[in-house]
Amino acid sequence: MSSDSSFASTASVTKTKTVREKKTSPTRPLSLTSTSSTVSTRSTRSRKTYDHMQLHKYVGQYKYVIGIDEVARGCLAGRVYTAAVILPDEFPDDEYKYIRDSKTLSAKQREKMCSYIEKHAVAFAVDYAEVDEVDQYNILNATMRSMHRAVDTLMEQLDGRLKPEFIMVDGPKFPDYKWIASDDTEISIPHETINHGDALYRNIAAASIVAKVYHDEYIRNTVEEHPEYEKYGWLSNMCYGTAQHIKAIREHGLTPLHRKSFGICKDATALETFRTDE
């Protein structure tokens, strides 16, 4: 009931009555070597595409398919969040039709759909990589590690009651995944990487919604705890590199939550320490 080797533990969120709780997850080393294929698709953002998304569930020989997506890979500060979601074949109402790329939904719509997904998903898990992990391993590797931990947590949660048969990932890369079951059986789950998959497949879109809601809640809680960080505009830019955020870095320096390996943060060597006396 663990992964095939070990890796630094980080927090994960599982499907529980109290949502957004954190727990440690199993860990393991990770290689970006992958034998899976990538489906490259043009991102189509029209309403017609999203109305049609209700028809886009994985139509293959697999019944239980994990959708995975990330949020905040491009941010200058804070955690990167990942989510893994298995959706049911059928829903009790038509609300599922609003499960679509999180970027096309308002914050209120995302919150509503996140609760809907949490309620009706067969299983879901959320994980994140802290800033130190991002700076140590780089953002791509930190994201892949977090994605694997999210699947680890989901597999722990299922505990052999059902076996996911396939993984669909938004983006161009995902390391091959293996799970060691409680009877020491090694389970390899094949996967497919799909560029702009959150705009094409419902289970990936669901993961994008869940990861986005958890990430944005983390930012709001962080700013509530540290009001001085709002000078960077985080409540509106959610730590992305907007003009306001970049200007604030130049004026006020870096906070402990900035990713020192990123762009302007990496270049701001003279501004390493956040000036709290301003």
Image: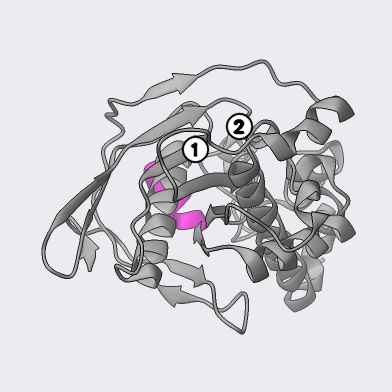
Q: Determine the main secondary structure of the stretch shown in magenta.
A: helix
| Label 2 close to label 1 by CB (< 8 Å) | yes
Q: Residue at x 57, y 42 (%)?
A: 269
**x, y percent for residue 209:** 70, 52
- Residue type at mark 1: give it: Val
- Residue type at mark 2: give it: Gly
Q: Residue at x 87, y 53 (%)?
A: 236
Quadrant housing residue 88: bottom right
Q: Pointer 1: what residue?
A: 169
Quadrant housing residue 222: bottom right
Q: Quadrant of the N terminus?
A: bottom left
Q: Residue furthest bottom?
A: 18
Magenta-highlighted residues? 130-138
Q: Is residue 25 above or below residue 54?
A: below
Q: Secondary structure at mark 1?
A: strand
**x, y percent for residue 244:** 86, 43
Q: Pointer 2: what residue?
A: 197
Q: Is residue 28 visible?
A: yes
Q: How many marks?
A: 2
Query: Is residue 64 shown left or right of residue 210?
Result: left
